[in-house]
Image (cartoon, helix red, strand yellow):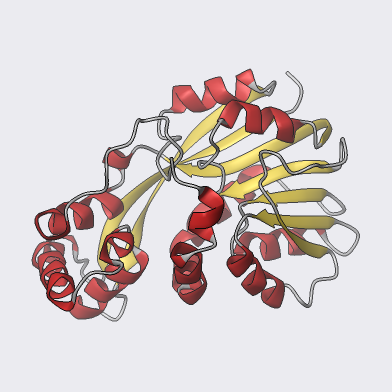
């Protein structure tokens, strides 16, 4: 099993900092859908789980207003450094390094637990959410976006399939192993949250497309997929020949996904999950 703290404090965290602007733009529609579902009101206290470089934390801080409070929590010191830089002008926003599954919180400290793709990496998700429920006030709520199954996400599958003959594939993992698509099974998500003591669990499918190469250039699209997409991890520490072959393989398949405007658009599917701290 991957050590999540070591992973996100290593090359992965550095890559997310380096590509922060592009990754935030790519993921922002999912965060916006979760924010809409959260119905944040002024003066609320919010814990942003797996806040990364702080994009959703900034949005939440604006929504809760000057008398509200937002705490962004993440295991990655590298990403939190960027988040703190971006949040310097928000006195109602703070950031904390820690593991959400075990970080001590004052009982009933928050009205809302929120996350954009930050809750799929717990070693024991049910225990983690049971722990987090203790940080919610009575009638508090949890709202998060998580990916549906890998098969339902061509933005991840198409590039990975294209480079498989060159780079191989990531080692297969059990469906419930911590990872980006570990919450793809809606029934499992419901079981986790209900097992942790949450009620009124609801999962809504959210589908959109992720665009690469907005300039209309195929080469730009290939480079963005290689930097921002799922194959970025496979390209780490590869020799120049392998990288060139992988990029060529991606370039060969993406014309089928080009829009009339020239950008490459690949489908993406997530769950927008809501639940209440009391059944």
Task: Give above or below for 250 relative to 116.
Answer: below
> Which residue is located at x 26 percent, y 66 percent?
235
Quadrant of the rendering where the N terminus is positioned = top left
> Which residue is located at x 32 percent, y 76 percent?
214
Query: Horizontal placement of 267 versus 80: left or right?
Result: left
> Which residue is located at x 62 percent, y 55 percent?
75
Query: Is any atom of residue 133 visible in this view?
Result: yes
Please provide percent x and percent y for residue 58: 69, 65
- As drawn, the residue found furthest toward the right would be 67
Please provide percent x and percent y for residue 246: 15, 67
Camera-nearest residue between 255 and 69: 69
Task: Give above or below for 61 relative to 84.
Answer: above
Camera-nearest residue between 139 and 126: 126
Please provide percent x and percent y for residue 78: 59, 69
Count the labels in the image.
0
Quadrant of the rendering where the C terminus is positioned = top right
> Which residue is located at x 35 percent, y 50 percent?
268
Task: Give above or below for 54 relative to 178.
Answer: below
Query: Horizontal placement of 214 versus 129: left or right?
Result: left
Query: Is any atom of residue 217 visible in this view?
Result: no
Please provide percent x and percent y for residue 4: 52, 49
The picture quadrant where one finds residue 151 is top left
The picture quadrant where one finds residue 52 is bottom right
């Amino acid at each position: 099993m991957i050590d999540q703290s070591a992973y996100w404090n290593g090359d992965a965290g550095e890559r997310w900092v380096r590509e922060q602007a592009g990754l935030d733009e790519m993921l922002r529609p999912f965060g916006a859908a979760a924010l809409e579902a959260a119905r944040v009101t002024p003066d609320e206290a919010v814990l942003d789980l797996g806040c990364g470089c702080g994009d959703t934390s900034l949005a939440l801080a604006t929504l809760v207003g000057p008398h509200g409070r937002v705490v962004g929590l993440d295991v990655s010191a590298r990403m939190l450094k960027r988040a703190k830089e971006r949040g310097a002008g928000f006195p109602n926003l703070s950031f904390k390094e820690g593991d959400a599954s075990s970080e001590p919180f004052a009982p009933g400290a928050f009205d809302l637990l929120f996350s954009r793709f930050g809750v799929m990496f717990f070693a024991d998700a049910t225990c983690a959410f049971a722990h987090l429920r203790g940080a919610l006030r009575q009638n508090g709520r949890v709202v998060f976006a998580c990916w549906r199954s890998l098969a339902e996400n061509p933005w991840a599958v198409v590039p990975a399939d294209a480079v498989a003959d060159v780079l191989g594939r990531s080692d297969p993992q059990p469906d419930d192993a911590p990872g980006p698509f570990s919450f793809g099974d809606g029934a499992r998500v419901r079981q986790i949250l209900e097992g942790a003591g949450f009620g009124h669990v609801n999962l809504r499918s959210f589908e959109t497309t992720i665009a690469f190469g907005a300039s209309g250039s195929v080469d730009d699209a290939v480079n963005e997929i290689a930097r921002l997409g799922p194959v970025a991890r496979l390209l780490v520490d590869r020799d120049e020949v392998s990288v060139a072959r992988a990029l060529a393989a991606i370039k060969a398949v993406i014309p089928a996904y080009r829009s009339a405007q020239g950008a490459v658009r690949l489908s993406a599917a997530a769950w927008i999950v809501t639940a209440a701290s009391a059944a």
